[in-house]
Image (spheres, grey):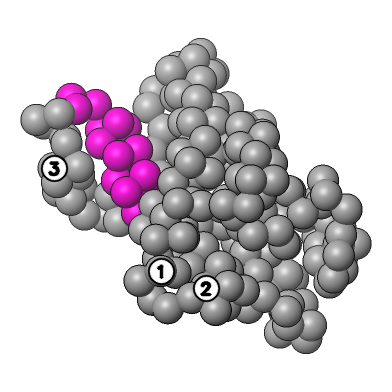
């Protein structure tokens, strides 16, 4: 049974995340960022980072030449936005159309629904992440579609994978340690508690992707933002 305090916390946290995303979306309409794709990045990351991201965007979002640490954080959030969108789409689709997980290994590669869903998450996140990188890199370097996609894939695969490692690690702790002890039953994407765990997992992903993005930007593989 889910403790009432956990359910209340989950609903509150989700409410704050959605309100933050809506605020940032409205702010993007009033103050469009120079890099168009960031107009999607800020609201999507607001879903898990909430008021902290609102502060960060208001302080550094419109700064042309921010400090190095800020540029690395912005580049990491750019990766995280693709992961966030992919996880929302994949987990929701898997909830309502569970048969889709057969394509991603359920029953023949994975016996656990969770691992098949993670595989779906990763594939979709990679596709969305490359698209996000393309719209950041191609305009800056004046690249054609083919060259732009290759550069985007080169910049995104390692960054996204490092994010997913932190996210999956945190979600594994939630599903195999925390939820069995507190809830005593599986938690799925139809429950607020699942998305609370996902919010925390995204923060875990940010931490593991931060040093990788530092290296990617310093090496010139990924553009400084």
Left or right: 95 in relation to 200 = left
Considering depth in this image, is 105 or 140 the residue closer to the camera?
A: 140
Q: Residue furthest left?
A: 108
For marks 1 and 3, give the one nearer the viewer.
1
Residue 102: give its label. Answer: 3
Q: Residue at x 79, y 83 (%)?
A: 31
Mark pair 2, 3: CA separation: 35 Å
Considering depth in this image, is 162 or 170 the residue closer to the camera?
A: 162
Q: Secondary structure beneath disc 2? A: helix
Task: Tell whether position 26 is magenta.
Answer: no
Residue that label 1 marks = 147
Mark pair 2, 1: CA separation: 8 Å
Left or right: 33 in relation to 108 = right
Mark pair 1, 3: CA separation: 34 Å
Range of magenta residues: 110-125
Left or right: 168 in relation to 90 = right
For marks 2 and 3, give the one nearer the viewer.
2
Residue that label 2 marks = 138
Q: Secondary structure beneath disc 3? A: helix
The location of residue 136, given as percent across then percent down, is 58, 69
Residue 7 seen in the figure: no
Q: Earlier in the sequence, mark 1 or mark 3?
A: 3
Q: Residues within 10 Å of mark 2 (few under 14, many from 20)?
A: some
Q: Residue at x 54, y 31 (%)?
A: 166
C-beta proximity under 8 Å, tags 2 and 1: yes
Q: Residue furthest bottom?
A: 30
The location of residue 11, given as percent across then percent down, is 62, 47
Q: Residues within 10 Å of mark 3 (few under 14, many from 20)?
A: some
Q: Earlier in the sequence, mark 2 or mark 3?
A: 3
The location of residue 224, given as percent across then percent down, is 70, 58
Residue 159 seen in the figure: yes
């Amino acid at each position: 049974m889910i403790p009432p305090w956990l359910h209340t916390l989950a609903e509150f946290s989700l409410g704050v995340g959605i309100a933050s995303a809506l605020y940032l979306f409205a702010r993007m309409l009033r103050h469009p960022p120079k890099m168009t794709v960031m107009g999607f990045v800020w609201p999507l990351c607001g879903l898990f980072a909430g008021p902290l991201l609102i502060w960060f965007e208001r302080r550094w979002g419109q700064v042309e030449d921010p400090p190095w640490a800020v540029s690395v954080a912005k580049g990491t959030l750019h990766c995280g936005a693709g992961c966030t969108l992919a996880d929302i789409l994949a987990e929701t689709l898997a909830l309502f159309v569970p048969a889709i997980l057969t394509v991603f290994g359920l029953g023949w590669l994975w016996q656990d629904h969770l691992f098949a869903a993670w595989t779906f998450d990763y594939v979709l996140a990679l596709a969305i992440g490359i698209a996000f990188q393309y719209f950041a890199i191609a305009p800056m370097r004046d690249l054609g579609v083919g060259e732009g996609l290759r550069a985007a894939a080169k910049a995104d695969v390692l960054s996204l994978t490092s994010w997913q490692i932190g996210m999956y690690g945190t979600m594994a702790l939630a599903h195999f340690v925390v939820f069995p002890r507190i809830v005593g039953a599986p938690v799925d994407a139809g429950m607020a508690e699942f998305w609370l765990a996902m919010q925390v997992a995204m923060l875990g992903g940010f931490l593991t992707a931060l040093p990788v993005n530092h290296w990617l930007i310093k090496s010139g593989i990924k553009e400084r933002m």
